[in-house]
Image (tube, grey):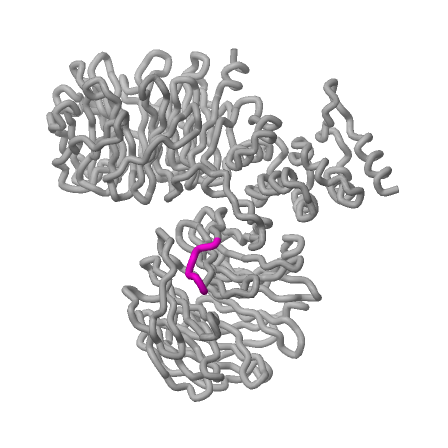
Amino acid sequence: MTAALYTRLLESVPRDGAGRRLWHLAAPYLWRHTAQHALAAGRLDDLVRDSEFLLHADPHALADALRNVESEQARHTAAVYRASWGLHHGMPPAERRQLLALDAARFRDARMQADLPGDADWRVRWATGHQVTRELVRTLVGHDGAVTAVAVTSVDGRMHAVTGSADRTARVWDLTTGRQVGTLDGHDGAVGALAVARVDGRPHALTVDQGSTVRVWDLTTGRRVTELLGHTSAVTTVLVTELDGRPHAVTGGKDREVRVWDLTTWQLRRLVGRHSKMVISLAVAEVFGRPHIVVSDRSGTVSVWDLTTARRVRELTGHRDWVVSVATAVVADRPQALTTDTTGTVRAYDLATGARVGELSGHTKAVDVVTGASLAGRPHALTGDRSGAVRVWDLATRRQRRVLIGHTKAVTWVTVAVLDGRPHAVTGSHDHTVRVWDLTARHETSALKGRTDRVDTVAVADVDGSPYAITGERAGAVRVWDVAGGRQVRELSGHGSAIQTIGTATVRGRPHALAIGTHRSVRMWDLTTGRRTPSLRGHESAVVALAVTELDGRPHAVTGSHDRTVRVWDLTTASEVGRMTGHGGSVTALAVARVEGVPCVVTGTSQGALRVWDLTTGERTRSLVGGHSAVIAIVAGQVDGRPHALTSHRAGRVHLWDLTTGRQTGTLIDGDLTVHAVAMCTVDGRPCAVTAGLDRTVRLWDLGTRTCVSAFHLPDEARAATVGSDSTVLLGVGHEVVVLSLEPLARRLR
């Protein structure tokens, strides 16, 4: 009967001439419930092969069902769907199609890429997949600010998460369904810490905002039941432990005090010392059969206290900076403390002796949170860093077991819950999300190798007749990619600081890459060999703007700096040949163009000034006036046969300028969003622009009509964009490189 019902439901979905189901014409009931019927009929794995169904299915209902897929292909499809699940809810199917097509490319899922190559305007060519992993099973969305604290507990027999945020709310989530089921209202500031406890058999949450009060909530009713009063300044951290068989809370604050509260009476039980500076983090452990607490404060001190006597018994030394998080674990029957500071080092200490017994090495960014957990009967640590990565470590061997990739900003909190009988990590982040990860899932990634950090710039060059992309990252890496094959060719070494802009030029007949960052020089590499060539030196402060042009038949670079100068360099001799002064602030962006046959540079400053300069004389020829803010980016190109510049500004505006007249001829974006990347191109003979920014969308504009003709939705913020000669759009999206093609749009416009 169940199978027959499911078959009849599928038969009710209209089909096209090729026999494909037209899910957009199906009854809304089927969008919500077909997955559950398929599960009951034992046909779920077959259903999720239908990519069109994935586009139209209710995201919550489908996510619930995907926990039960069985085949390897179905599990892989589930991983693709979950990658951007948190964004699907507010999107129509057309936008979900774009995300699913891109996520299929991130996972290198050839079958789904064939089903979903893109849409009517854009085709996804490839993506590096550096921020996706199969362990992700849920993304909880709803907070309007950074998630700053996470705790898990059972409510009415189901596992729930309680989360605190910079949006001044604490929210309650059913971890089985991923749905928000409650909000703990009434906080006066960001909820920076929280904990959960069972008091008289009922689940409670303790939350702290930027004040001195600890609020206590009954999670069954959602009501505030009492407050813990006594701190004289803001409470910064809270945990729950058991003392003498009763639940207790331990709190620390800016008043440098650690207080212990009996949660059965809601009364202060004792003070545990007065610390040198603000208390940052707390953890509890049993040492020699007695409860102890590990305390880190802003002075850099990590101390261990006997909770029974309130006496300090030892100090854990060797940190190079103040410790932002502490945790405890039992390794080989001995209690250990785990500490992490802003250098990214995680240290392990024997709590019985105070001796340092090891380190967990592998993070490339500061680690803001560490927690201990027992997985498969072995002691483990989970750490979260500012790149968005969560790492899982076996503490007995101190080896990294897996990396959980998906958060797009710093991880602030990590805890562990058991769901469906399996351990899961529950993590919070500055990206406003809470994510749930299956720690027993098979760990694998289809990503291209070389992940380091956020991609902030991208350029293209021809190397031996093939198109190559050169990308620069915030951590200083410069990578070269084969655009046709979607593979990394090499990494260019020798920069060492955050890369802001990449340029390309042909020098002595060979393709070169130029990179600028926080240095006062411009680094250069021969792209054929990958070797460094002489740098351009002379600026007195960091070089932050770069363009490449040809003057008198020779390749030249034009650079702008915080030293308020623009300099011109002959790339053949690596020497300075010109300089333009008189800028009222840092030169933050520039582009080169020919205006009435004269080579010029358009410059923008941190104060918003836009000027045009003659590159042959070094004289200023005009100013572009329009009441704009700090300039982020400039590109130049032809519109209606005349040279134009497109400028992006800190206030969220993108303007188009006629460089012959100096007049503003259009505004593409007017204060709605911050655009970090702009590019100009031609699509089917029409002058166009590409813009990308913090709203996770890349847009194509017709510069003749000043209108947006198409948009493609992305899983993360885009900070870099360029367009190749074949209408290939190359983007830096979070930590990933994404390559799209505008060929479908070009065909549509013909």
Side of 110 where 690 appears, left or right: left
Residue 26: image quadrant is top right
Instruction: Say which quadrant the N terminus sits in.
Output: top right
Asked if residue 155 is positioned above or below residue 80 in the image, the reply reads: below
Residue closer to the observer: 591 or 409: 409
Residue closer to the observer: 445 or 471: 445
Q: How many marks on residues?
A: 0
Residue 601, percent from left and from top = 22, 24
Asked if residue 118 is positioned above or below residue 736 in the image, the reply reads: above
Q: Is residue 139 visible?
A: yes
Query: What's the residue at 39%, 24% (across, down)?
Result: 723
Asked if residue 150 is positioned above or below residue 489 in the image, the reply reads: below
Query: What's the residue at 26%, 38% (across, down)?
Result: 493
Residue 605, percent from left and from top = 25, 36
Residue closer to the observer: 233 or 154: 154
Side of 227 where 18 appears, left or right: right
Q: Is residue 610 visible?
A: no
Side of 40 where 527 appears, left or right: left
Query: What's the residue at 32%, 36% (across, down)?
Result: 472
Residue 204, percent from left and from top = 61, 71
The span shown in magenta is 396-401
Asked if residue 106 is positioned above or below residue 307 in the image, the reply reads: above
Residue closer to the observer: 363 or 413: 363
Whether 244 is among the magenta residues is no
Query: What's the residue at 76%, 24% (across, down)?
Result: 15
Residue 179, percent from left and from top = 64, 53
Residue 639: image quadrant is top left
